[in-house]
Amino acid sequence: MSQAQCAEKLSLFTEDYLGTDGLMMCGKCNSRKQHRVEIFGAMRTVYIMCDCRREAVEAEEAYYQQQAVRRRTEALAREACTFGHDTAWQQAAFALDDWGNHEASTLCREYVASFASMRETNTGLLFVGPVGTGKSFLAGCVANALLEKGVSVGVTSLPQILYHMRDFSKRGVLERLQEYDLLVIDDLGTERETTYAAEQVFQVIDARLRTRKPVLVTTNLDPAAMREAKDTMHQRVYDRVLEMCPVQVTLKGRSRRQEVARQKRERATQGPGRDT
């Protein structure tokens, strides 16, 4: 079949056409769909992807990769709630941060950006401050930012850990807590002041230290109070926390919760039709 006959037959079924060199060209992007190569001393014509087909394949691959990342992020987020902590942290995001504590906000972003190094050196964070100053919010920002990067994060509190140790396998709980790349422990010091509780808390912190995996701890206790714990067991717990969390930030200022409540009261007292 002559080149002219091939071109005529091709045009009946597709927009593709033969170029001046006799190779098939894409009728959409006008790039080659065939290529000549030498195979065992003979020239052969082989099919190749044209530019628009290659772009379509790359776009499809990118889509499926994005879907895989999304599914993994969602799975990690579900696993992060294994121990039943308040899930309000899942709504926290750096995009919502008002930079009310500039030093802490900056440090959190830097920690996320350099987490591979922080993970390697087992460097944790300690957020200290009164109730309502944004400790849990910033901890949630760090957790969610790392989850989006495919990092395994667990978010819990010691009362929840103690609850699961009591009702489930203590060994299983400790092993699960060791698996997370980062473990966020919210509100250290709110657990019951008992010797048993302190012993379990120590085992959790010690397990993280032995596996060389960092923790992010939030607490109302300042480091000085932690160093002056009233009994030996609590001293051991807090000493271990301070050892694992060399980066310590104190959050100060008016309680954000009280500020939100104040704003709601003001809006409520304005009455209908009096918004400004």
Image: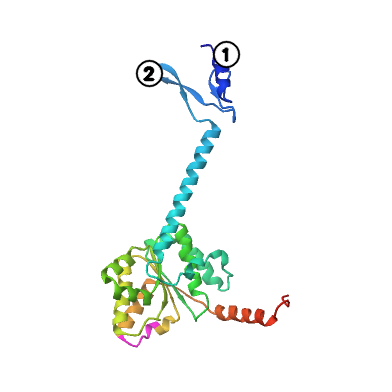
Q: Please, what is the dominant secondary structure of the magenta stretch?
A: loop
Residue 171 falls inside the magenta stretch: no
SS type, badge 2: loop
Q: Which residue is pictured at 49% across the width and 45% down the height?
A: 62
Examine the rendering and report whether any part of residue 263 can be seen: yes
The label on residue 4 is 1
- Applied colour scheme: rainbow
Q: Is residue 29 above or below residue 12?
A: below
Percent of width and height locating residue 252: 53, 79
Count residues near mark 2 (Cα–Cα under 10 Å), then give few for <14, some for 14-19, many for 20+: few
The label nearer to you, 2 versus 1, is 1
Q: Residue furthest front?
A: 272
Is residue 25 or residue 127 the one in the foreground? 25
SS type, badge 1: helix
Q: Which residue is pictured at 65% across the width and 80% down the height?
A: 268
Q: Quadrant of the C terminus?
A: bottom right
Percent of width and height locating residue 72: 42, 55
Instruction: Measure how far apart labels 2 and 1 are at the Cα level.
Output: 29 Å
Residue type highlighted by circle 2: Phe
Q: Which residue is pictured at 36% across the width and 85% down the height?
A: 229
Drawn side of residue 258 relative to residue 170, left or right: right
Number of marks present in the image shown: 2
Examine the rendering and report whether any part of residue 18 can be seen: no
Which region shows up in magenta? 226-231
Q: Quadrant of residue 259?
A: bottom right
Percent of width and height locating residue 39: 40, 20
Q: Is residue 95 above or below residue 198?
A: above
**Mark 2, residue position:** 40
Q: Which residue is pictured at 47% across the width and 42% down the height?
A: 61
Query: Of marks 2 and 1, which one's residue comes earlier in the chain?
Result: 1
Percent of width and height locating residue 125: 43, 70
Residue type highlighted by circle 1: Ala
